[in-house]
Amino acid sequence: HRHGGNLKTRSSELGSAVTGSSLTAVLPASSTVKKSKVLSSESREELAKQAKVTKEERRAQIDGRHQYLISRLADGIDLSEQQVEEIIISDDKFQLVEQFFAPSGLKKLLFFYQDVLQQKSNASLRPDGSTNNLPQKNLFITMGSTEDFTGTCAFFLRTSDEVITASNVSQEVNFGMFECTNGNILQGLEFFLSQIMIPALKSQQNWGAVKEGLKNSQIQEFLYAVDKFVDTLSSSRQNIEDKIQLKKVDIDVYVRNLQNPSDYITAG
């Protein structure tokens, strides 16, 4: 019994001398790593199950209001209605759709359709430590303030604070789209207003003159203000694109030639 105890102690000492740690400490570490891998795999499976359940619950909520949004998006973007529906019910911001429909809800609902970097699940690291990310067109719901706008913006706007129902969605919700070509949002907005909105406004026959008491002069004043805004937008865009480039000057050459007060006065 003593020999066995001494042998065990010496084995531990030998292990400490060779590895810098006791042999008994190595075994729990390997088993812990194996256990954590199993838990990680189980967690992923559980998350996948929860995501599937959430998608099916959302799919069951789809009604005429959602179908109106889906059909407009499918018409404006090169996607089928089935694809758009799948994207919407899978989106983390799906609750924004419900908030948009609610009485006195969100005034706007935005979708971006643009290139998003996708990382391959089986991609290996490059020599510099980076991964192989590939751009892919994605449609997603957005607040418009957290992601850069580089592609197409599809938007829905409410016209009142009434609750949006399947029967009034086509009257209460307006749909539009504009492009952000090469990241130039001003050019996209200018094109949308000048080529789509202004012609539509000028061809408008019913301005609700009886209901709102609008006069023709007020309508013309409004159209003039919109035209003026587009002109200002166009000028701002051109000023940004044709910005002044200041050339760097070696001021030391001029300073060295300033010898007396008269030289400073002349330079001024």
Image: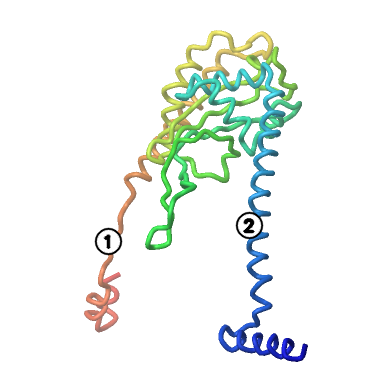
Residue 247 has which mark? 1
Secondary structure at numbered mark 1: loop
Whole-number angstrom distance, CA of label 1 to CA of label 2: 60 Å
Task: Name which quarter of the figure residue 60 lies in.
Answer: top right
Which image quarter holds the N terminus?
bottom right
Secondary structure at numbered mark 2: helix
Please tell me which residue lies in front, 104 or 264: 104
Left or right of residue 232, residue 72 in this image: right
> Which percent across, then down, holds residue 37?
63, 57
Q: How many marks?
A: 2
Instruction: Name which residue type carries label 2.
Output: Lys
Please tell me which residue lies in front, 46 or 118: 46
Which residue: 61% across, 34% down?
Answer: 90
Choose mark 1 or mark 2, whichever is in front. Answer: 2
Which residue: 45% across, 21% down?
Answer: 196
Which residue does the numbered mark 2 point to in the structure image?
37
Question: Which colour style is shown?
Answer: rainbow
Residue 152 has which mark? none
Which residue: 27% across, 61% down?
Answer: 247
Instruction: Name which residue type carries label 1.
Output: Lys
> Which percent across, then down, holds residue 168?
69, 14
> Which percent across, then down, holds residue 17?
59, 89
Left or right of residue 161, residue 170 in this image: left
Rendered view: 251 above or below 103 = below
Which residue: 76% across, 91% down?
Answer: 2
Q: Residues within 10 Å of mark 1 (few under 14, many from 20)?
A: few
Please tell me which residue lies in front, 5 or 90: 5
